[in-house]
Amino acid sequence: MTLTLVHRVSMPAPATHLVHVETEITSDNGCLPDEIVLFMAVWTPGSYLIREYARHVEGFAAEAPARATKIRKNAWLLRTGGCEHASVRYRVYAGELTVRTSHVDASHAFLVGAGLFLGIEGQENLRARLEIEVPQGWRATTSLAPTRGTSGGDKVLSFEAPDFDTLVDSPIELGPHRVERFEAQGKPHRLAVCPASALSDTDARKLVSDARTVIETQAMLFGAGLPYDAYELLLHVSTHGRGGLEHRSSAALIVPPSSFDTREAYLDLLSLVAHEVFHAWNVKRIRPAGLTPYRYGEECYTRLLWWFEGGTSYYDWRTLALARLCSAQEYLDHLAAEIAYVEQTPGRLLHALEDASYDAWIKLYRPDENLANSSVSYYRKGEVVCALLDVELRARTAGRATLDRVLAHLWAEFGVPQRPVPEDALQSVFERVAGVPLGDLFDAWIRGTGEIDYAKTLAHVGLSTQRVLRPEAAGCSLGLRVRAEGGRTIVTSVVRASAAWLAGFDSGDEIVAVGGARVEATNIDGTLRGRAPGETVDVVSVHNGRLVTRSVVLDPARADRFKIVCTPEASEGARHAFRAWLGQDPPTGGST
Ligand SMILES: [Zn+2]
């Protein structure tokens, strides 16, 4: 028996954020199975958190004579009565604008399949038709294939998804957004910008031109053209943060309105574009076994996010450098900032990269005040480690092996044939490409928690590192991270093993005075100026509503910035290796 599945979507009152969905199942031989289990995903690939999308479902009901009974938090048992067809109706509240949640209001609709559409248990490969009734004047941008022949006229847009994976993997932007079309490597691309007025014509043209350069540079890295037939960048310009979510043939991006104001902000936007496009190869087609197949009702674990996210982060900025969209100096400044983050994260000494990857679901995606003390971002340490692996590969093989070669190899061995990457395969793939053992590096950087000797590796490309203090920093430190809240200074986290940690401070404490001086906003440094490490100072705080005075023995100031500097006496060989690595000359002037 073959089933036909149709999802009908309407938004009769978009300002209420409610999406109305009707799911109809029809049998081609006259009667449906007596019982069908319908489910909604609890997470969406690329975002490793159980989001419980079904919590936004309301008014779930089957059309008589069929009956629906909820049997799990995200599943319903449909008793069809053996009819030829059955349908269920429900509404979904879509009030959160992020790249992984649907958002509907009077101005537009962004539809994310994972939190909107039902799958049929055991029939995840079933083709589905999607019919969307849209307000007058709205259009759709999505990687789903449009279909013809719906009865609703122009107001109903119709698409087809070959399976549930594709339905979940194809977000849809609906509304009066701006659409820019361009070609890269002979394939059609669209940039959808919402709201349409968010970009000037000049900014839109520049972004399209630079996105094309990014895409073509990455296609060259993989050496086999683009892996998709067409691609959509769905860009939301919003004050709701910054982020991206990768899909096989599209990406959802959200960036702040200031993204075109400064060079720094624009490079951040371009790196986000480069990151999500790179994922079209790395994670969407070169896929870790732990994420294959996607199991939508539970966590899918992988130890390889240090590569699939960290490696992708390495290649986003590296793409900008190779394409000369950023200078070598800008690239090194970015890498130095990532090293500074790792160095300021005490959790790096407790939680190995591959374990941080495995625990993404309960650590990185559920951050609290203890996260930096107990774990490290597999994005950011992963990026640093991938940069160092690239340099080491080149150094150990006299430039013969590179991470780019590893990439091309992964594409040929796993991406093209669509074979999942075994969880223990990466070291052996790297070693096969390099022809030299790399176990020491994998042990130390990926499976281990020790300090990393950045300088030793960066010396191969004529660079050295410096730890520097912010110009406004005091010469000593308490070891507190704080935020201003209504004119008060509130502790957000206490750095493990710092002066404040040893003295017993807690996140949530209010810092009132240091050494008799009132703390203004977040300016603790201002109260420490003139004092020395080892000195004891009284700190007045409010803990749980009570005034507390603690004596604190001050730490040396934490070097919270990092500089990567070109070594003046670097050999010509090292300078040549730098050029081979970044595709640009080392910055002149000796330092970044
Ligand atoms: Zn990513």
Image: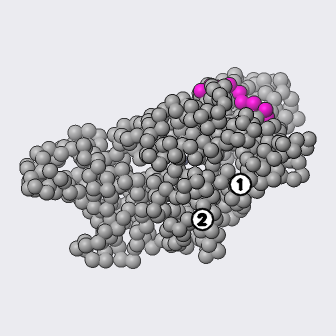
* Mark 1 CB lies closer than 8 A to ligand 1: no
Image-based side of 377 in relation to 179, left or right: right
* Contact, mark 2 vs mark 1 (Cβ under 8 Å): no
Mark 2–mark 1 Cα distance, whole angstroms, equals 15 Å
Give whichever of 369, 575 is nearer the camera.
575
Vertical order, 556 against 135 (above or below): above
Q: Can residue 360 be seen in this view?
A: yes
Where residue 220 sits in the image (x, y, percent)?
Answer: 61, 56
Give whichever of 107, 543 is nearer the camera.
107
Q: Main secondary structure of the magenta part?
A: loop
Q: In which quarter of the image is residue 536?
A: top right
Residue located beneath label 1 in the image: 321
Q: Which mark is residue 40?
A: none
Residue depicted at x 24% and y 43%: 122
Q: Which amino acid does label 1 sit on?
A: Ala
Which element is circle 2 on? Answer: helix
Give whichever of 164, 216 is nearer the camera.
216
Q: What residue type is labelled 2?
A: Arg
Examine the structure image and report whether residue 144 is included in the region drawn in magenta.
no
Residue located beneath label 2 in the image: 212
Where residue 496 sits in the image (x, y, percent)?
Answer: 66, 27
Marker count (numbered): 2
Where residue 570 sits in the image (x, y, percent)?
Answer: 88, 41
Q: Residues within 10 Å of mark 1 (few under 14, many from 20)?
A: many
Where residue 475 sits in the image (x, y, percent)?
Answer: 84, 34
Model colouring: one colour
Counting residues from the start of the chain, the first of labels 2 and 1 encountered is 2
Residue depicted at x 29% and y 65%: 131
Image-based side of 87 in relation to 424, left or right: left
Q: How crowded is mark 2: few (under 14 residues within 10 Å), some or many (20 or more)?
A: some
Vertical order, 152 against 279 (above or below): below
- Give the residues in magenta: 447-456
